[in-house]
Amino acid sequence: MRVVKGLNVSKVAQRAEPVGRHYIAGQWETGSGEEVLEITSPSTGAALGAIALGTQDDARRAVDAANASRSALAGMSIWERSALCMAIAERIEARADELAEIICAEQGKPIGEARGEAGGAAVAFRNAGEQIKWLESASFPVEDGAKRAMSMLQPKGTLGIITPWNFPVALPSIYYLGPAIATGNAFVWVPAPTTSLCAVKLMECIIEAGVPEGCANLVLGEGPVVGDALVTHAQVHGICFTGSSEVGEIIARRGAGKAQLLELGGNGPSIVFADADIERAAERIVAGAVGNAGQICTATERVLAHADIHDALVDRIVAHARKVAPSLSTEAGCVLGALNNADNAAKVDSHLAEAVAGGARILTGGGRAKGLPTDLYYAPTVIVDVPPQSALHCEETFGPVVPVLKFSSVEELDRLCAMSPMGLSAAVFTRDVGNAFRQAEKLRCGIVNINEMSSYWEMHIPAGGAAGTTSGHGRTGGRHTLREMSDLKTITFHIGD
Ligand code: NAD
């Protein structure tokens, strides 16, 4: 068995019929590779199937198909593209139960969250279909009376879309696939290997709705192989990537010169001031840590608590965390399911171990849950006296963990905030409106939620990394993504005197 970073899959010899196949140039096919990856459920440990492992040649063929066909999508009227998005939403709704079951089995999240995710994917296509109809561009006053000037929004061309495993169906739909189709861009999509079967099902919905042949392509496989082939292909005009800051940096370099929409890691602070509603803050902080088992880019990653209320807040956080027990993801009522893969679980272990070695104290949780089918279930963990320089504080942990640090002054708070290079989201808990706005304006991140957990978001709200941080650039969310995926073309006319 070969374990690749981020994969809980084994690479085995080619089988006659893998369950997951590529969709290239209007055909489902097994590709030119000779190997498949077997996928095991993080929730139950059951074998779920295998995927054909793509090669660079498969990715390049998909790009060629997209380029040869893209005028078919670009040439549809906006009303026709909007109707296509609505038809995809209907296909997703018709297959929502099936999608939810595979999300739960393959990603590891509770079945209730998986149902929400499938429903969210349908809404994403509806939103893209609605908003594209009302997206305007401008005409410009000019000095020369014999001229007129206007701009129009055009598709960028062919997009290379690379996505992670934490929301394998909703995230690609919201951030990229719905907006790409609405704006008339052809695409090649490379999903995360550990959630490939989810991607195949979503792609089936897209194809069943009647996207012009060759304009939507799916290539399964390892990121450094098939993903890199997209990033470096001269005929890929834009790269849409969501994933870790580490891989985002590689992609930014390898794809230099192309349009890039990069949504990367987060380590947003949840700041609790002395005047905050402690009970609400504690409840929201725990909710933000256990949703999707903490595997959300905007999850509660670190709590910065004012010294005056630190102990009272920690008591309430522990009380809320103890109400949540990991349980079988597939069972109704599960609130905290499995982590997606062994590498991620090992990262959570190592961040906790390093902090404890540096003097931190675990008040509840602190390791894998027992008595469940896999060792990927993690107990909700509250840890205090966390060393500020530890990875638990400065990096993204991506597990159901609440690390709490203390601050006594605004200067100390500013120093702690600045210790992480990331800048995606933050939460501020205070009753003082002026203080809330001062903090919101000062924090270097794309979204600040006041008196709400850092992961609160609705899919039409702009979100993304702040400039100068390692959380990416560009904005996803409703019409902001539609603009990111469009090129602004200026046209001037000489109309004569
Ligand atoms: P990852 O960076 O390991 O992988 C993301 C994708 O990139 C996968 O499909 C992977 O196969 C591919 N990939 C890996 N190496 C590549 C390479 N060299 N070239 C091209 N593609 C490559 O991330 P992950 O572990 O799948 O996802 C978790 C990360 O995603 C977290 O850091 C999380 O914060 C981030 N994320 C960010 C947002 C956001 O909106 N900012 C949303 C969700 C997840």
Image: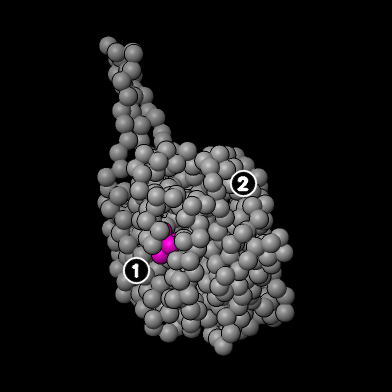
The answer to the question of whether label 1 and label 2 lie on touching residues, with beta carbons closer than 8 A, is no
For the N terminus, the quadrant is bottom right
Does the magenta run of residues contain 299?
no
Q: Name the residue under label 2.
A: 419
For marks 1 and 2, give the one nearer the viewer.
2
Chain part drawn in magenta: 281-285
Q: Is mark 2 on a helix, strand or loop?
A: loop
> In the image, 160: left or right of 131?
right
Residue 375: x and y, percent? 61, 81
Magenta region, main secondary structure: helix
Percent coordinates x, y for residue 279 in the rendering: 38, 62
Residue labelled with disc 1: 119
Identified by mark 2, the residue type is Met
Residue 245, visible in the rendered structure: yes
Q: Is residue 217 visible?
A: no
Which disc number belongs to residue 267?
Answer: none
Across and down, in percent, residue 426 comes to 47, 50
Task: Provide residue 256's location: percent of width, then percent of height.
Answer: 62, 42
> Which three-letter amino acid code belongs to the residue tagged 1?
Gly
Q: Which residue is drawn at 27% across and 11% down?
A: 497
User: Does dot 1 land on a helix, a strand or a loop?
Assistant: helix
Left/right placement of residue 340 relative to residue 86 reads right
* First of labels 1, 2 by sequence position: 1
Q: Is residue 496 above or below residue 248?
A: above
